[in-house]
Amino acid sequence: MDSWTKEISKCIDGERIFSQSGRDAVIADKIFIVTGAAQGFGYGIAQAFAAMGARVALADMNERGAKDAAKVLASEYQSDCIGLAANVADEGQVAQMVADTVRHFGGLDVMVSCAGILKAGSLEDLTAEDFSRVNAVNYTGFFLCAKYASAVMKLQRGLDPARMHDIIEINSKSGLEGSKANFAYAGSKFGGIGLTQSFALELAPFGIKVNAICPGNLLDGPLWSDPEKGLFRQYLEAGKVPGAKTVEDVRAYYESKVPLGRGCRVDDVVRAVKYVIEQPYETGQAVPVTGGQVMLR
C-alpha cells in the first residue's frame, strides 16, 4: 500500500458505509465526484444528484466557478457540496481532488468523469499540440480519475464485501461513430470506451462497475452555443457542414439528423447516469443517449 493510499484509508468513514438512507433509496447520501462541473453537463449532473440527496464534490479547472456552483447547490438543496480545483490531465491534481473529497465526506461512491474539451479541424489544419491537448483531458483524464477513484472504492469494498461502486465516463456519440473534421475528439472518445470496457473487466472483482454514457449533441449548452468558441462557430469555420452560411444553419443541420427532432438535454443524461448506478448487473457498457441519431449495431 503506497503512502497516498495509506493516508486516504485513514479518512474513510467506516460507519457511513453501513448506514446510508435518505430521500432517494439508491442515491441519497452517496458521495459523488463530478469533474467539469462548473457548467454544462457536469453542472447539470451535479445539480440533479444533489437534489436527490447526494453529497457532491464539484471539480473543475475553473476553481472559482466550481466553488460558486457548490455554494448554489448547497443552498438550494440543503446538500453537502464542495467545489474543488482540478485539471484532470494532471495526475497530482487528480490525486488531490480525490483525497480532498475523502477527507471532507469520509469516502467516495460514484466518480463521474465529465471534464472534456473539443477542438475541431481537418488533418491539414489541426496541430499536434491541439491533438495532444484533447487527448490529455478526454482520454488520460478519464484514466487518472478511474485510477484514484478505484483505489478508494477498493478500500471501502474491504469494509463491506457486498458494497458496489460506480465509475462513469460521460463519453459522446462521437465515441460510437467517427466524426468528420473532429478526429481528435472522436478518437479520444473511442479510446474512452476502450478504457471503460478494460476497467470494467479489471475492477469487477472489487464490485466497481464502469460504464460510459454517450450523449448526443447538447445544442443549448455552452460547448455548442458559446458565440466565440462554441461548436456552432467552430464547425462553421471548419466547413464541417456543407453549404452552411451561419451558426443557425449549423444548428438546423444537427437537429435534422436526430429522429426525435431535438438536441440532447442534461436531464436525458442524468436519467442514464442514474440507470447505471441503480442497475447492479451492468458494467462495461456504452449507453447511447442520442434521440436515435446513433443506434447500436
Image (cartoon, rainbow, N blue to C red):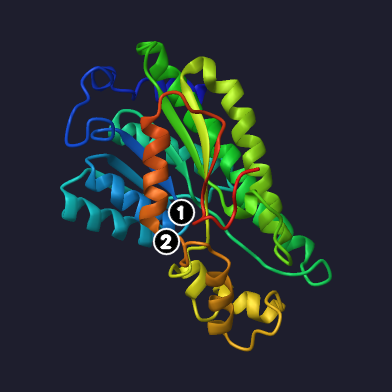
Helix, strand or loop status at disc 1: loop
* Residue at x 65% of width, y 84% of height: 244
**For residue 267, which quarter of the picture?**
bottom left
> In the rendered view, would you say 255 is above or below 236?
above
Q: Nearer the viewer, mark 2 or mark 1?
A: 2
Residue identifier under label 1: 36
Which of 43 and 69 lies nearest the eye of the viewer? Answer: 43
Whether pointer 2 and pointer 1 mark residues with C-beta atoms closer than 8 Å, the reply is yes
Which of 189 and 65 lies nearest the eye of the viewer? Answer: 189
Furthest residue in direction right, as rendered: 124
* Residue at x 41% of width, y 24% of height: 280
Q: Residues within 10 Å of mark 2 (few under 14, many from 20)?
A: some
Spot occupied by residue 207 in the image (x, y as percentages of width and height): 46, 19
Q: Is residue 79 left or right of residue 115?
A: left
Which of 33 and 122 lies nearest the eye of the viewer? Answer: 122
Spot occupied by residue 137 in the image (x, y as percentages of width and height): 60, 51
Q: Is residue 84 visible?
A: no
Q: Is residue 249 left or right of residue 38?
A: right
> In the rendered view, would you say 16 is above or below 99?
above
Count all numbered tags in the image, as a single digit.
2
Helix, strand or loop status at disc 2: helix
State how far apart marks 2 and 1 are (Cα). Answer: 8 Å
Q: Quadrant of the C terminus?
A: top right
Type of residue at label 2? Gly
Type of residue at label 1? Gly
Q: Is residue 97 visible?
A: yes
Mark number displayed over residue 40: 2
Spot occupied by residue 83 in the image (x, y as percentages of width and height): 34, 51
Q: Residues within 10 Å of mark 1 (few under 14, many from 20)?
A: many
Which of 83 and 224 lies nearest the eye of the viewer? Answer: 224
Spot occupied by residue 168 in the image (x, y as percentages of width and height): 48, 38
* Residue at x 37% of width, y 13% of height: 162
